[in-house]
Image (cartoon, grey):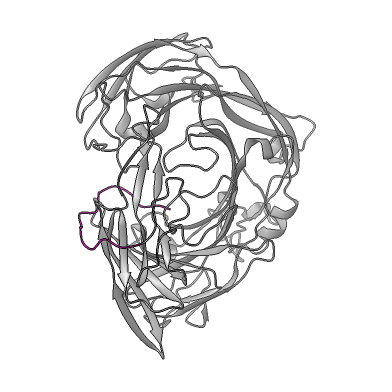
């Protein structure tokens, strides 16, 4: 995941590396520098006027190249010239090295370091961002009061006085601003003032705090400026329930729901500052409908899941989306609104129904509770309609399979559940997904060991050392371009990312200074493959065709 926000306040030696790349690739092209060098500059394309170049928003606080020779780690410190959009790490000898990229602490004071194993001499930190330069994040509240007529009645989840569900569908209001890098959603039963009741034919003063229901790639919802023509579009994503009585009721496809864009309107430019509010009026207009012809296959998925960590079966779930990506053909860095979203849980079966679930009666189940076994949704075909009101960008199909393990019983003083989590994901252009059979194409890394020790999920593995070697076996399906390893500390409050390590090899050594005596950690190993993968491109978004698969270790300590 890319890190952005503050401008790097450093200015130093200009270097002789090649010109800047505005499309996220190819940092070289000029004369070779003495060591490692490259470009680090952003291009901002908000959709309003011509794109502009500006200083990098990567919140980098330092660049250090590590070269190991005969067991000795030699460090080469880099400098960044923000005005020229270049960086240089002089003196790095030819051959392999590890680039340590340090980032400024976030608002909570948490910082992390990103490590990348490389041999290349000229690198590219350039990024194309699909929002405007100079956003100012809001820190308190930012309320929009929305009134607009609808072409379709609003559906709000409804219960009667006895808590019986009388209307199960819950439409989504999706909010999206390209120029301010904002997307999010809310529902009618959110409890907000003016939220629509079931079957409402208009929105009548729905008060929505953008800081509560939206998120931004920029790291906080930015202020809106009328003078800068900032945009905000509202999508009415209608909820639909699908039932198939020919399927077994235990089949996840026998009953499920999804939402898709059916109508939308774009607000006229307005001003909204931190702590302020804005009144927005308009009329929703129906969006022309397209078809997603889904041909879902779980043949390979079921095989890959055999290599997954021991997990809580009730967490296994699938999400399928169609999103609008402003950048085309290569995605930009920013946020994407969902035009279609389908979510369903995997099927869970139990050998001992009387002892099913974690809350079984221990006296009746002396052998323990039967937590069940998750089986992913089976092969399935169906056609869905959705709309896209945007006249730019491209539509991407996104697939996620989520899973996780509760490790709170191993954590002292834990009062709530703490999960280690992983996922398999694929992204591809809609033309390569609709009407074509889809299944996973990349398997999971397996047999991860830390410091020569296996790390079971039901125990804490101790004594791995402060700089252990982490090894794994490559996936049995597909050939990864790269592995991204996330090292997180784990305590009763949750997980905190402390470092990442990117490598093309199936092992690496955790650098000194990352692990601390007395703390608990877990490692997440992600294999990935992307069209046009280039190891010298270190900050741009992944390509439009991308797959990744994650596994994770149990808890360990030095």
User: Is the residue 122 above or below the residue 267 in the image?
Assistant: below
Q: Which residues are magenta?
A: 1-16
- Residue 73 at what x, y percent from top left? 35, 83
Taking the magenta stretch, the answer to whether it contains residue 273 is no
Q: Position of residue 72 (x, y in %)?
A: 36, 88
x, y percent for residue 76: 30, 75
Report the residue at 48% width, 10% height from top: 150
Which residue is depicted at the point 31% across and 78% down?
Answer: 75
Residue 419, position in %: x, y?
45, 57
Q: In the image, 287: left or right of 294?
A: left
The answer to which of 186 and 273 lies nearer the viewer is: 273
Residue placed most toward the observer, 185 or 222 = 222
Towards the viewer: 293 or 303: 293
Magenta stretch prevailing secondary structure: loop
Viewer can see residue 255: yes
Q: Nearer the viewer, residue 25 or 60?
A: 25
């Amino acid at each position: 995941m890319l890190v952005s926000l503050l401008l790097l306040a450093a200015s130093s030696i200009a270097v002789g590396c090649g010109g800047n790349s505005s499309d996220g690739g190819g940092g070289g092209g000029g004369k070779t520098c003495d060591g490692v060098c490259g470009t680090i500059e952003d291009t901002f394309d908000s959709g309003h006027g011509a794109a502009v170049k500006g200083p990098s928003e990567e919140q980098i606080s330092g660049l250090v190249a590590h070269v190991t020779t005969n067991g000795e780690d030699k460090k080469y410190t880099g400098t960044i010239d923000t005005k020229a959009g270049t960086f240089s790490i002089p003196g790095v000898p030819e051959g392999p090295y590890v680039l340590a990229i340090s980032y400024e602490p976030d608002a909570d004071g948490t910082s992390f370091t990103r490590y990348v194993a490389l041999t290349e001499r000229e690198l590219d930190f350039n990024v194309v961002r699909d929002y405007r330069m100079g956003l100012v994040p809001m820190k308190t509240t930012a309320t929009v009061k929305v009134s607009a007529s609808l072409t379709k009645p609003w559906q709000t989840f409804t219960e009667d006085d006895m808590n019986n569900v009388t209307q199960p569908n819950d439409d989504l209001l999706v909010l999206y601003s390209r120029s301010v890098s904002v997307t999010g959603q809310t529902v009618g039963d959110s409890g907000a003032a003016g939220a629509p009741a079931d079957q409402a034919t208009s929105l009548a003063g729905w008060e929505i705090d953008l800081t509560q229901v939206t998120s931004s790639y920029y790291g906080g919802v930015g202020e809106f400026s009328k003078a800068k023509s900032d945009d905000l579009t509202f999508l009415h994503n209608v909820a639909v329930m699908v039932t198939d009585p020919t399927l077994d009721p235990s089949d996840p496809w026998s009953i499920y729901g999804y939402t898709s864009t059916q109508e939308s309107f774009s607000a006229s430019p307005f001003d909204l500052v931190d702590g302020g509010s804005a009144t927005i009026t308009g009329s929703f207009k129906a969006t022309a409908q397209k078809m997603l012809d889904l041909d879902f296959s779980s043949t390979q998925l079921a095989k890959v899941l055999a290599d997954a960590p021991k997990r809580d079966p009730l967490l296994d779930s699938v999400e399928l989306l169609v999103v609008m990506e402003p950048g085309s053909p290569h995605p930009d860095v920013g946020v994407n609104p969902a035009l279609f979203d389908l979510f369903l849980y995997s099927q869970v079966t139990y050998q001992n129904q009387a002892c099913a679930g974690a809350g079984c009666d221990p006296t009746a189940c002396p052998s323990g509770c039967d937590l069940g076994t998750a089986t992913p949704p089976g092969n399935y075909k169906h056609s869905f309609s959705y709309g896209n009101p945007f006249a730019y960008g491209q539509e991407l199909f996104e697939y996620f399979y989520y899973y996780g393990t509760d490790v709170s019983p191993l954590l002292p003083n834990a009062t709530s559940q703490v999960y280690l989590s992983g996922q398999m994901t694929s992204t591809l252009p809609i033309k390569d997904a609709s009407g074509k059979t889809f299944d996973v194409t990349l398997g999971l890394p397996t047999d991860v060991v830390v410091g020569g020790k296996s790390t079971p999920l039901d125990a804490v593995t101790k004594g791995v050392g402060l700089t252990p070697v982490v090894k794994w076996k490559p996936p049995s399906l597909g050939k990864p371009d790269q592995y991204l390893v996330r090292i997180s500390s784990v305590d009763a409050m949750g997980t905190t990312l402390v470092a990442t390590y990117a490598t093309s090899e199936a092992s690496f050594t955790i650098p000194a200074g990352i692990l601390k005596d007395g703390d608990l950690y877990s490692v997440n190993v992600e294999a990935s493959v992307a069209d046009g993968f280039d190891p010298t491109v270190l900050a741009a978004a992944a390509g439009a065709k991308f797959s990744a698969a994650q596994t994770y270790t149990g808890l360990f300590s030095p």
